[in-house]
Amino acid sequence: TLPKAVTIIEVGPRDGLQNEKQFVPTEAKITFINLLKQAGFTEMEVTSFVSPKWVPQMKDAKEVVSACSDSLRNIVLAPNQKGVELAKELHCQAVAVFVGVSNTFNKKNINKTTKESMQELVPIIQNLKEENTFVRACISTSFYCPYEGKMKEEDTIALCKQFVEAGVDELSVADTIGMANPKDVYSLFLKLNQLFPEVLLTAHFHDTRGMAIANIYAALQAGTSRFDSSAGGLGGCPFAKGATGNVATEDVVFMLHEMGIETNIDSSKLLEAVSFIAPYVSRKIDSKHFALKPVS
Ligand code: HMG
Ligand code: MG
């Protein structure tokens, strides 16, 4: 049976913008975040504490975080000790760590093997939990890696298990390069839902091959009720060859509402947020519902 309500975690301000070459002014990022909050999102990836040399677009993370002074779940990404320290200094309520199932991808993304990242992150997660911080673990290349090809389901499950044992609150299981298919998605999410009922399970799909909506439906059928998506379908990881945008939030919201599944998101306000950010990004907004209902 399908869920009656779904939580959408908006990742536009982080995943959506991180790959944009032209710097989006900090004020515009903050306005974008505020417009999204007005549309009803209560969980959002707002920025990431990463090396400004590696991802220059996120160099204003401190300013962005300082502007998010409400009690909503403002998530910041942090790949290492340094990022987590910055998050602590700014009293962030929610931290997302990220690791790839694929070693080659993890090396390219955070300059460590998967094992090295886990050795660093497990004690950090335990410490964050002692301090009552919400911890989300983003599992990249859960289905495919652009360098290693198809990942083994058991390897993805094993990495998720390590995070659950370390005490994370949430797993966000990602198809980084939009290669997953609904059959594999159903199989993995069914197993994860059965194995780890104690954590929040979220699906994160990129739409490189137009499969994301079908994959969301498969994950829904497997009992998943949390999805990451990006307003306007922006996004992509700079270190994953061939990765394009996340599934567009407005398209996900449309499907869910048509199916009678609640999201608490106001679609027209969401489209206003997309209209606002559109002139700041290089990519043409090609989500179906932005094209259908442009906000005048
Ligand atoms: P490195 O060069 O090995 O790091 O990079 P280092 O420890 O040698 O430090 C190099 C410099 O970066 C130093 O500064 C550090 O202080 C600084 P310098 O002395 O040269 O001036 N530094 C930092 N600054 C700010 N915040 C930090 C930080 N750490 C070090 N946390 C590092 C290693 C992890 C830093 C680098 O590889 C990096 O920043 N990677 C980030 C990659 C990234 O942001 N990828 C995109 C996000 S993941 C994603 O999109 C996937 C996801 O959406 C799910 C999916 O779809 O799969 C989540
Ligand atoms: Mg992503």
Image (cartoon, grey):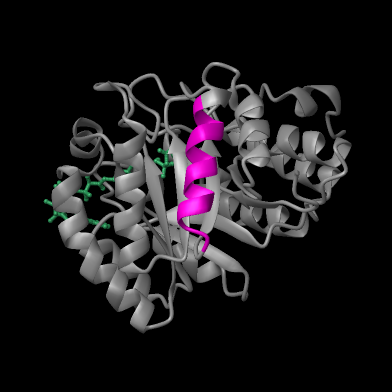
The image quarter containing residue 246 is top right
Q: Residue at x 60, y 40 (%)?
A: 230
Asked if residue 189 lies in the magenta stretch, the reply is yes
Taking depth in this image into account, of 218 and 62 the one nearest to the observer is: 218
Q: Position of residue 257 (x, y in %)?
A: 85, 41
Asked if residue 29 lies in the magenta stretch, the reply is no
Q: Residue at x 64, y 46 (%)?
A: 223
User: Seen in the image, is 83 located left or right of residue 267?
Assistant: left
Taking depth in this image into account, of 212 and 34 the one nearest to the observer is: 212
User: Seen in the image, is 251 located left or right of residue 81?
Assistant: right
User: Seen in the image, is 200 located left or right of residue 111?
Assistant: right
Residue range in magenta is 184-197
Q: Position of residue 221 (x, y in %)?
A: 67, 38
Residue most toward the bottom? 131
Instruction: Give the vertical position of 11 relative to 177 (above or below).
Output: below
Residue most toward the top? 209
Is residue 242 something that shows in the picture? yes
The image quarter containing residue 255 is top right
Q: Position of residue 213 (x, y in %)?
A: 66, 28
Q: Residue at x 80, y 56 (%)?
A: 264
Q: Main secondary structure of the magenta part?
A: helix
Q: Position of residue 21 (x, y in %)?
A: 41, 31
Q: Quadrant of the C terminus?
A: top right
